[in-house]
Amino acid sequence: MDVLADTASSASAPRWRSYVLEARCEFLRLLREPMYVLPTLLFPALFYVLFAVLLGGGRGPAAAQLLAGYGAFGVIGAGLFGFGVTTALDRAQGFLQLKRALPVPPGAWLLARMAMAMLFAAMVTLLLVALAATLAGVALPATRWALLLAVNVLGVLPFCALGMYLGTLVGGNAAPALINLLFLPMSFLSGLLLPLAVLPDILARLAPAWPAYHLGQVALKVVDGDAGGSLWLHLAVLGLVTLACFLLARRRLASAG
């Protein structure tokens, strides 16, 4: 029995090591891309300082609501660009086909990329939390801070799936433009950058059609600033987007060889 146990553990060790090495390579790859790292980490923080601290006075419930909105904005960008651009580049360069030929566990690159998107989502959230607690005077119970972090870290996954699907539609050079065409209007029309009350009524009514709206509403529930919709409806929409985009992306990648 001991021999069998030792054999099983030695056989499983290389598999786990493959996942760890894959995640490490993805992390180093993203760190070496300043056009990804700097906008992902700094833009939400700069917007928050501008609108919540400098223009918003830095106090009151509005600062907490902007924290939720810009947090969602930041993690959506981390998911879309982290998956979309890299998937498009890897397709164009034949890297995904090479991965299939290598002796690595199936899906290791996908799990590693998901882990890195969640890591960057956590970094974005922690940076915003630090600014909110110090400069904007936002005071929340420890459980609320932790819940907001969990919402953002898990909330990046639907947009990882959406980004991966977008990355299967175009080449590496066109991917950033395509993602920006979706990311910025979707964030604006979902009420993440500005309250929906300032938008024309027809645009505000169409906000639930965007997946970003539902992530924003889940985050706003943590700070008691949402529009009062059903939490389960928001989660169901995000889950459906994740599943649908992942299946569509998988189909396109499989058909491409």
Image (cartoon, rainbow, N blue to C red):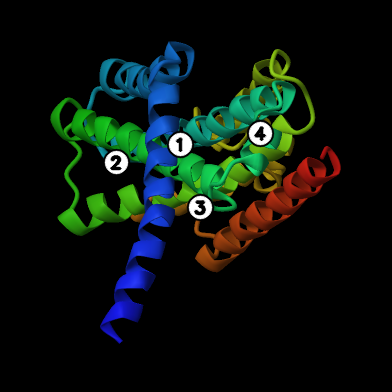
Distance between the alpha carbons at the discs numbered 1 and 2: 22 Å
Q: Nearer the viewer, mark 4 or mark 1?
A: 4
Q: Residue 189: horizontal and vertical position, in percent?
A: 63, 32
Is label 2 or label 4 in front? 4
Q: Which mark is residue 98?
A: 4
* Left or right: 61, with 204 as reference point: left
Residue positioned most to the front: 3
Mark earlier in primary sequence (2, 4): 2
Pick whichever, 25 or 74, lies toward us: 25
Is residue 199 shown to the viewer in this render? no
Q: Which residue is labeled 2 in the image?
A: 61
Q: Residue 81 appears in which quarter of the rendering?
A: top right
Residue 256 screen position, x and y as percent: 83, 37
In space, the residues marked 4 and 3 are separated at their CA atoms by 47 Å
Q: Which mark is residue 227?
A: 3
Q: Amino acid at mark 2?
A: Pro
